[in-house]
Image (tube, rainbow, N blue to C red):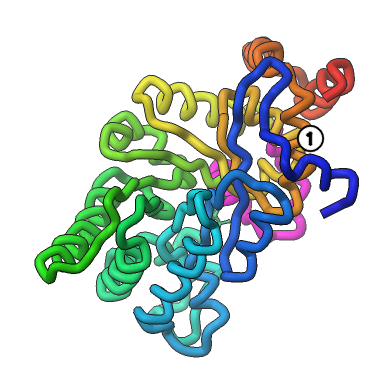
Amino acid sequence: QRAEFAAFKSLPSITKDGERLTIAMNAGLRDDVEALETTGADAIGLFRTEFQFLVSATLPRREAQQRLYKAVLDAADDKLVVFRTLDIGGDKALPYLRSDDDEENPAMGWRALRLSLDRSALMKTQARALLEAGAGREIYIMFPMVSEPWEFDAAKALVEEQREWLIARKKLTPHKINYGAMLEVPALAETLDLLLPKIDFLSIGTNDLTQFLFAADRSHPKLAERYDWLSPAILRFIRRVVRLAREHGVPVAACGEMGGRPLEAMALVGLGIRRLSITPAAVGPVKAMVRSLDRSALLAHMEALLAKPPDDMRAALADWADENRV
Ligand code: PEP
Ligand code: MG
């Protein structure tokens, strides 16, 4: 946290024209939660539950999972926390949870919700840990890599089954569960109208979405600079998702590294995104950007740019930011 941004810690994320945005942060371990205080983030918009599994030599037991989730909720106090169910597999392989086959394309392989639905004992254990940790509170559960609406249905049913199990045993459960899906597989956009009526919130995972939209490995060094987050393809795609979500009255956030850069975050706001979840170090700089922004002017400018995209979208957006002292 650079000193110049420390001043923004206690200031709300309000644009110059009075729009309140949510600047949340990403986390994965108990100690990450301290950053809520140091950065002044509004919430934890993405809690990557697989981190506990990645730092452990053996499968974390339900009690350990529940302890972590409860500690996170307690530490976050009145700020909301979105728990993402396990995103294991691909580059996040676990030695103690081996898949039988070597995968040629792990990012497109047996990972995340696909693995969780097939290994339902794993998912049930996690669901129970989340419900116990959130007993008596309102909680937020989000599923990664949803590719088709039925996967969301199956995942939600699994959690609901655990809730009923607990209720039948007179255990205290959360008084409200909000269910969300991540949009990071482009195919989901084609059936999003079918999914939206079922979900309480949507979060666009810009890391995987970019990788799949461009068919470009997110960790390949030779491709790192090749495709720009500020390309018309990505921006138009996100705009379409935001519009559809708005028509259905479903709140939509963007998480992933894209929103952690002020210019990219500005572009996302220009597409109608009101909630970002970003790396803690970016909260100060992005808040500063938001507070210097005339959102309605940006929305209009973005429309014009996307109607007839210039060759260099990045330069065009940077010029607008300069001219408008963003
Ligand atoms: C993403 O894909 O954008 C995302 C937020 O999830 P992860 O980086 O953990 O895959
Ligand atoms: Mg992802």
Tell me the quadrant of the picture where the N terminus can be found: bottom right
Q: Position of residue 156 (x, y in %)?
A: 25, 53
Q: Assign a secondary structure to mark 1.
A: helix
Against 148, residue 72 (above or below) is below
Instruction: Indicate the position of residue 323 as horizontal and vertical percent values.
Output: 88, 16
Q: Examine the rendered structure and indicate whether residue 226 appears above or below residue 191.
A: below
| Residue 98 appears in view | no
Q: Is residue 178 above or below residue 91?
A: above
Residue occupying image coordinates x 49% and y 63%: 74
Examine the structure image and report whether residue 226 is included in the region drawn in magenta: yes
Q: Is residue 207 one of those drawn in magenta?
A: yes
> Which residues are the magenta region?
206-230
* Residue marked by disc 1: 288
Residue 203 seen by the camera: yes
Front residue (pair 93, 171): 171
**Picture mark count:** 1
The answer to which of 133 and 308 lies nearer the viewer is: 133
Amino acid at circle 1: Ala
Q: Viewed as shown, does residue 106 lie left or right of 269? A: left
User: Can you give x and y, in whole percent of width and height, for residue 176 in the image?
Assistant: 29, 48
Q: Quadrant of the C terminus?
A: top right
Quadrant of picture, ligand 1: bottom right
Residue with the most extreme left position: 168
User: What's the residue at 31%, 68% (across, down)?
Assistant: 132
Could you say where residue 96 lies in the image, as x and y percent from the top left? Answer: 45, 87
Does 87 sit left or right of 164 as displayed?
Answer: right
- On screen, residue 38 versus residue 115, left or right, reads right
